[in-house]
Image: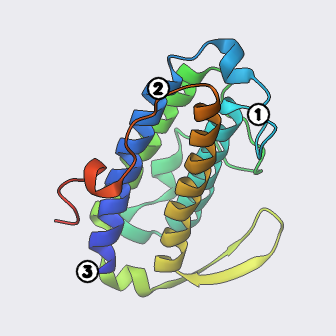
Amino acid sequence: MGLVKNFRMMSLYNQRINAQLMTRCLTLSTAQLEKETHSFFTNVIGYWNHILFGDLVFLKRLALNEIAQLSPQHLVEFPTAKSTQDIYHHKLSDIANLRKKVDELIVQFCQNLTEEECDKFITYTTTENVIITKPVADILQHVFNHQTHHRGQLTCVLSQLDVDYGCMDLPIIVSEGSC
């Protein structure tokens, strides 16, 4: 399977699983959303904000290099990612609206992505002020891995809150596969 087909499939998975998990989280009380998790992030709100941070910081890096027709202009309506601890919103409904827009942008980005762009190298500065040069494909693989990693942590927290978050299997969520 080509890289572009894989990234398109992963963008759909990301969009659909985020919507599924967000729907479950929106049923939680404020006390549950803000409950100390004793895990990587303080609470459910912290997890959602951090997943957004990862997406926003890498979308900006890709936009600055105009990969897949993405330009900085596409990100004007979004908050600027500055730190891994960024809090964009405290209300989950506001996070849900932002999450939906970011996921739509990621899907569109992957629809516009070419195999040639996957091989292109870009250079960016990390939030720790380290300069890194990587191929676009490696960066995108990290973006999707980052989301999956932190959603896994979030589902552990949801399990502890007795939330049934449903099936998360890729072949079920994106039943059409990479087609």
Q: Which residue is the site of mark 2?
A: 24
Q: Amino acid at mark 1?
A: Thr
Proximity of marks 1 and 2: CB atoms separated by less than 8 Å: no
Height in image: 44 above or below 31?
below
Height in image: 94 above or below 125?
above
What residue appears at the point 46 percent right and 60 percent down from the top-left corner?
71
Judge the density around disc 1: few (<14), some (14-19), many (≥20) Cα neighbours within 10 Å.
some
Which tag is nearer the camera, tag 3 or tag 1?
Answer: 1
Q: Which residue is the site of mark 3?
A: 1
Height in image: 98 above or below 143?
above
The x and y percentages for residue 177 are 22, 62
Q: Amino acid at mark 3?
A: Met
What residue appears at the point 33 percent right and 78 percent down from the top-left corner?
3
Q: Which residue is the site of mark 1?
A: 37
Residue 176 tag number: none
The x and y percentages for residue 150 are 61, 50
The x and y percentages for residue 69 are 36, 64
